[in-house]
Amino acid sequence: MSSLENISKKEFLNSKKEISSFIFEDKQYWLKKARATKPDKLQDFFYKILPFELLIPPIKKDKKEALEFEISKLEEFFKFGINVPKIVYKNEEFFVLEDSGKTIYSILRDENIKEESFYFYVDLVLVELTKIHNLGFFHGGSQLRNFTYKEEKVFAIDFEESFLKNIDIKTLQYRDFLLFLLSFLKMKELKFKIDYERIIDKYIKFTNSVEFKKKLINFSKKLRFFLWLYKKEFIKKRVGSDVRYFFELIEILNKMGKNAE
């Protein structure tokens, strides 16, 4: 039994966390335990009423199924040259990854970050996300917290979610991009305004998915009534932060659509 395997098993037994880190031979590693995945009941309910891509619920998987799925996706992405952390040990209960640095989300939300540096990192993430899409894959959890940066490279992480096979790949890629855009809205520390149209246009340039911009604008048009309703003070003060972020994005897309008219 190797020393790394030994230490990994000790970490698995001693840590109560689902994801934990440890040091072996002066290098950091991350251990992820098997954990079940299931759709949020509220999300599932709303998807039946409003079948928007953003609300597509993931498949329910038990611990073993979720672990096997994520391992297979990490190995497949690694094989195709997508930047993902390398699996250094795996068994039926957990797997161990090489460290892949700080999350992009933590880097971008620094209140002292300059606009030029901000878009430098955003563009690196877009390169990796569009690499996944151009190879015919989807991420599934493409929020900024699921991309990391180390040694001038961006890595994609966290691939637990899967979806019904009858959902086409373009729909899942569009869902990825919506999640990606939404994750910027939580950054309230920045001293400059995020240029969403720049981000959207850069993604389209890398993927040639011209239809995505039209879909985003049409998507926002469909929700104009809900946006109007959301702005009512008695509703606005009662909703959670995720709902607020969602409607902030809808408002941005609405303005983009009006400018294009």
Image (cartoon, grey):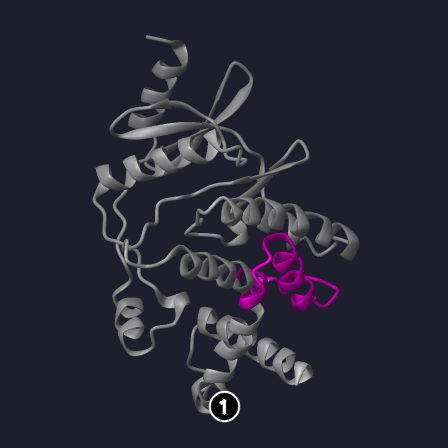
Q: Secondary structure at mark 1?
A: helix
Image quarter (top left, top right, bottom left or bottom right) of the C terminus: bottom right
- Viewer-proximal residue among 249 and 10: 249
- Viewer-proximal residue among 201 and 244: 201
Classified by dominant secondary structure, the portion drawn in magenta counts as helix
Q: Residue shown at 44%/58% (left/top)?
A: 170
Q: Residue shown at 40%/10% (left/top)?
A: 3
Image position of 239 (left or right of 148): left
Residue type at the position of mark 1 = Trp
- In the picture shown, does residue 1 fall above or below 188? above
Q: Position of residue 139 (x, y in %)?
A: 44, 49
Q: From this viewpoint, is residue 189 visible?
A: no
Range covered by the magenta-colored residues: 183-212
Among the 4 quarters of the image, the one containing residue 181: bottom right
Q: Position of residue 250 (x, y in %)?
A: 53, 77
Write down the residue under mark 1. Answer: 228
The count of marks equals 1
Q: Is residue 189 highlighted in magenta? A: yes
- In the picture shown, does residue 181 fall above or below 71? below
Q: Is residue 60 highlighted in magenta? A: no
Q: Residues within 10 Å of mark 1 (few under 14, many from 20)?
A: few
Q: From this viewpoint, is residue 247 visible?
A: yes
Image quarter (top left, top right, bottom left or bottom right) of the N terminus: top left
Q: Position of residue 123 (x, y in %)?
A: 67, 50
Q: Residue shown at 23%/40% (left/top)?
A: 65
Q: Residue shown at 25%/66% (left/top)?
A: 41
